Image (tube, grey):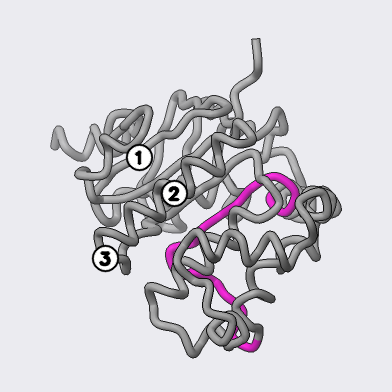
Amino acid sequence: MTAPIVRITDLRFSWPGQPPLLEVSTFQLNAGERLFLRGASGSGKSTLLGLIAGVLEADHGEISVLDQDMTRLSGSQRDQVRADHLGVIFQLFNLVPYLSVVQNVILPCRFSRRRQSEVAAAGGADQEAKRLLAQLGLDDPELLARKVTDLSVGQQQRVAAARALIGNPALIIADEPTSALDADTRDRFIDLLSREAQKTNAALLFVSHDGGLASLFDRALDLSEINASAQLAGAV
């Protein structure tokens, strides 16, 4: 039996001086699974993603990503796991302002030999970047040469998605990735995430407060269902 892509056990996290924000006894995400995780603003969705991606450190518990316990790795080791195996669409995009659209998309390949190998097999980093961008409706050569700061917010969001997908990551994490997109672009966006994940049996963890998107995924879960802190707060 294949080990899950993500497995969380007895997780606890709180910001300094604050009561626990997350207390998750168990959570699992399998290879090839597309999971929709919903929750209200401030419920800890982005924090949970940061813990899984190794950007934040848990106070207690185990967070296994691809059979590696992120809580036992050094900061540089967590960075390498993320560079090699995770595609993260951050809520604030985190694009590099002085780079062009294509340069932003291929940036992860500069930090990972595994991704370099994957894009080389697909015809090269530039070609793969342009393929992903075209799938998201960004195929104008003049636009691709622009700095990302010259793009609309919706266009920047799609560039961030293409950057996350390049190099066939084993886990795609998307934090409110459709907030700036119209309905048609949003549906095309989600379809691309799903198709790219399916190609390599990657897991997709899609986080949003918009419960209307849940039917587009294999499984839907409300963060309050697994977060004991939220359950306790609701009982008070």
CA gap, disc 1 and disc 3: 21 Å
| Left or right relative to 173: residue 116 | right
The amino acid type of the residue labelled 1 equals: Leu
Q: Which of 15 and 173 is in front in this view?
A: 173
| Residue 182 tag number | 3
Q: How many labels does the image show?
A: 3
Classed neighbour count for the residue bearing mark 3: other residues with Cα under 10 Å, few (<14), some (14–19), many (≥20): few
Q: In which quarter of the image is the C terminus?
A: top left
Classed neighbour count for the residue bearing mark 2: other residues with Cα under 10 Å, few (<14), some (14–19), many (≥20): some
Q: Residue at x 70, y 45 (%)?
A: 85
Rendered location of residue 110, percent (x, y): 80, 65
Dividing the picture into quarters, in which one does residue 228 lie?
top left
Q: Which of marks 3 and 2 is nearer the N terminus?
A: 2
Q: Residue at x 41, y 57 (%)?
A: 17
| Mark 1 and mark 3 residues within 8 Å of each other at the beta carbon | no
Give the secondary structure at mark 3.
loop
The amino acid type of the residue labelled 2 equals: Ser
Residue under label 2, please give it: 14
Residue that extends furthest to the left in the rendered view of this protein: 236
Which residues, given as a range, are shown in magenta? Answer: 82-98
The amino acid type of the residue labelled 3 equals: Asp
| Residue 37 tag number | 1
Q: Which of marks 2 and 1 is in front?
A: 1
44 is higher (above) or lower (below) than 129: above
Q: Earlier in the sequence, mark 1 or mark 3?
A: 1
Q: Which residue is drawn at 35% across and 40% down?
A: 37
| Left or right relative to 120: residue 168 | left
Rendered location of residue 155, percent (x, y): 43, 74
Q: Which of 16 and 146 is in front in this view?
A: 146
Give the secondary structure at mark 2.
loop
